Amino acid sequence: MTTRPIRHFGDPVLKAPTAEVVTIDDDIRSLVRDLVDSVELPGRAGVAATQIGVGLRVFSYNVDGVIGYLINPKLVEVRGELEEIGEGCLSVPGLWFPTPRHPYARAVGIDLDGQELVVEGQGLLAQALQHETDHLDGMLYLDRLSKEHRREAMKQVRESDWF
């Protein structure tokens, strides 16, 4: 089992859009294994490749005991009115803020065999799909906060012992 260290806010890899995976080879299989191992730790709903320092379009998720991954995911559908939901991030440890998210999301990607994979859900799974695809697009949940919440979040980031 290989759990990789999580990059924190301020690391430039977290703000860079990721590259599509072109070839599924041993390096990609190893990356997926590491992402799955890294998301299996308690309290983790998702880990994007950028969070472990890799600029490729891959993430893993762990919601309600279901662990999986998507290669080259695209968020193809969101439904419902945006709701502010308490959200945190491994890359912004210890902070939680109301983040606007849709209650339903569907993402499409591929698996390690190159076969289409569809992951969809409501609640925490919808939130995780939106959160992780944001990471792959170079966004953090802090970027989605209201002006007031973002101001407070940035204050707490600056005061944190990890920043």
Image: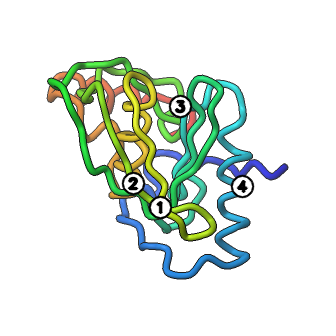
Sequence-earlier tag: 4 or 1: 4
Label 1–label 2 contact, CB within 8 A: yes
Nearer to us of marks 1 and 2 is 1
* Local SS, label 3: strand
Colour scheme used in the picture? rainbow
Q: Position of residue 16 (x, y in %)?
A: 37, 64
Q: Earlier in the sequence, mark 1 or mark 2?
A: 2
Pick whichever, 107 or 82, lies toward us. Answer: 107
- Tell me what residue is drawn at x 26 percent, y 41 percent: 143
Describe residue 79's horizontal placement relative to residue 118 as left or right: left
Mark 3–mark 4 Cα distance, whole angstroms, equals 20 Å
Q: Amino acid at mark 2?
A: Val
Q: Which residue is mark 3?
A: 93
Judged from the image, the secondary structure of the residue bearing numbered disc 1 is strand
5 sits left or right of 138 in the view: right
- Please, what is the three-letter code of the amino acid marked with disc 4? Asp
Please name the residue that numbered disc 1 is placed on: 116
| C-alpha span from label 4 to label 1 | 21 Å
Tag 4 residue: 34
Label 1 environment density (alpha carbons within 10 Å; few <14, some 14–19, many ≥20)? few
- Give me the C-alpha separation between circle 1 and circle 2: 7 Å
Q: Residues within 10 Å of mark 4 (few under 14, many from 20)?
A: many
